[in-house]
Image (cartoon, helix red, strand yellow):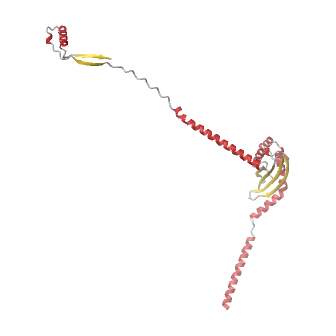
Amino acid sequence: MNRRHGRISAKLLSLLLMVICVFALAGCESTSIDKSSYKTAKKQAEVYQEASAMEDWAIDMIAYLNAVPDEQIRSDAEAAISIADYTNKNYPVDPNGIEIHTVEMYNSWIKTRQDLGQLKSIDNMSITEGTDTSTLCVITVDATYELRKCTFEFTINTSNEIEGAAINPAFTLGEKMSKAGMNTLIGLGFVFIVLIFISWVISLLKHVNRFGQKKAPEAAAPAPVIEEQQEEEEDLTDDTELVAVIAAAIAAAEGTAEPNDLVVRSIKKIRRRS
């Protein structure tokens, strides 16, 4: 019995030590600082502290875009004139002056302006902390214009600079379908124009060899055939009368008294024809 109780006591002691170790380890982990929680808390405090000034910046920025003509906006951007220079106020956004993303926002506004008309009212505004480490907050503004409503989304990074800006007009379904159809027609028209041009180029390829070939020289006229006179010979040795006459003529020419002394071996008559 004593041995059995001793074994049980040893097991209980081991279990108790394990429980103590677990709680000790948990206590050690709870004493470490959570860096992500620290960064989130700091970001929230900064956004809360600057929320009012950021809202003023957003309102003044939208008012500036609505009131200033496009040419003046371009001129201000090219001259690096910020909204703070225009209103003579200090804002937490773009503290070092106009940034490249602000210029991109101006270009987006100039393209979108004709779809909105004049500003009528700013309906709602909210500021939310950024979800990633490089984003401080996102300022969302709902505004009403003459033609339609529009939502602005300004993304501010941890350096208090504009990281991005989205201008989203609220188009109706019919307007979206109309724009999609127009874009489709333009795309198809461009494709057909290119195909027609390619077909025309291909049709010209058959004429390429003609330009490269030299003109073949004309065939020379055949030289006139000069018919040589053909001579036909006829053996007349058997003609005794002709032999006697020829022998007498030769004897007279040679001064020979007797023509019989001459021997005529062959007499040939030549016929000429052209």
Task: Please give left or right for residue 143 compared with residue 204 in the image.
Answer: right
Q: Position of residue 212 (x, y in %)?
A: 52, 32
The extreme bottom residue here reads 1
Q: Nearer the viewer, residue 243 or 2?
A: 243
Q: Residue at x 70, y 80 (%)?
A: 17
State whether residue 233 is above or below residue 2: above
Residue 205 seen: yes
Residue 90 seen: no
Q: Residue at x 66, y 89 (%)?
A: 4
Q: Position of residue 231 (x, y in %)?
A: 28, 18
| Residue 54 placement: quadrant | bottom right
State whether residue 5 is above or below residue 234: below
Q: Position of residue 81 (x, y in %)?
A: 80, 45
State whether residue 169 is above or below residue 46: above
| Residue 131 placement: quadrant | bottom right
Q: Position of residue 150 (x, y in %)?
A: 80, 50
Task: Please give left or right for residue 230 compared with residue 31 in the image.
Answer: left
Q: Quadrant of the C terminus?
A: top left
| Residue 68 placement: quadrant | top right
Q: Quadrant of the N terminus?
A: bottom right
Q: Nearer the viewer, residue 173 or 157?
A: 173
